[in-house]
Image (cartoon, helix red, strand yellow):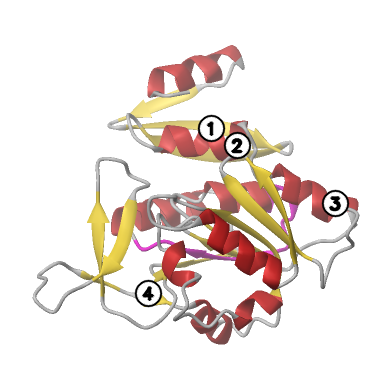
Amino acid sequence: MSNTFSLVEFLKLRRIKIEKKGNSIFFSYLINDKSFIINLKKKSSDIKVFQQILIEEEYKIIIDFFQKNNFSPVTIVDAGANIGLTSMYFTAYFPELNIIALEPSQKNFQRLTHNILKNNLSNVTCVPKGIWGYSSNLTSVKDSKDWSFRLTERSDSSRSEVCEVLSVLDIIKRFDLKLIDFFKIDIEGAEASVFSEKANLSWLNRVKVIAIEIHAEFASKDCIENILLEFGFLIYHSGELTIGFNSKFVDNDL
């Protein structure tokens, strides 16, 4: 599904009413038999994100894991929340959980907060920051795709806007997290910093399930997966995601 036309045709076949306003389309969409108001920007990467999360259901393996084990997650960290579709998806299955949704792009963050408010998702805390492996001065690198808002280290001479970031340990401290039931990381290459030699990776001991979209042009998939294995994670794949289940918290028989 590469464009808005394809998505509109997909929705029409399912008799879903679409409202067009300016550069956006609005429609109600059922997730786990619960209705959510979806707002997507036309001719943007929103279409691809919608396809991956809500049509292909890349995170369904994680939902299935929690349900199979009769376990309701309490805390999710959604790093790279984009416009909030992942937060909606998990809320549809576990309405009582708490979600910390981080998004450094100002434009995406505005749409994230709009979507969360429009759907009355009081369980989602939106944070206008990115994540990084350690303290640094960062700036943004933006290409034509809305989801490709990428952070990079900033030189002293740069006049670009500085972006605020938190390390994973910062997040744990700020929100007093004893455990993270599910940690989603889709941060456009910044995972290279999060899993770098300079980063403190002790937080992995507090994570039950992790899903990372590894961007090969910036980060080594083998390196990140080897780190997960060292911390006792069992590794699976779903679409473009590398998914790890921490053996300290789960049975080997998934």
Is residue 99 one of those drawn in magenta? yes
Task: Identify which residue, 64 or 25, lies in the foreground.
Answer: 64
Residue 126 falls within the magenta-colored stretch: no
Residue on which the image places disc 1: 51
Dots 4, 2 in contact, CB < 8 A: no
Mark 2 vs mark 3, CA separation in Å: 18 Å
Secondary structure found at label 2? helix
| Residue that mark 3 sits on | 67
Q: Which residue is drawn at 46% across and 34% down?
A: 48
Residue 76: quarter of image = bottom right
Residue 113 image label: none
Q: Residue 54 — which label?
A: 2
**Which of marks 3 and 1 precedes in the sequence?**
1
Q: Which amino acid does label 2 sit on?
A: Leu
Precedes in sequence: disc 4 or disc 1: 1
Helix, strand or loop at label 4? It is: strand
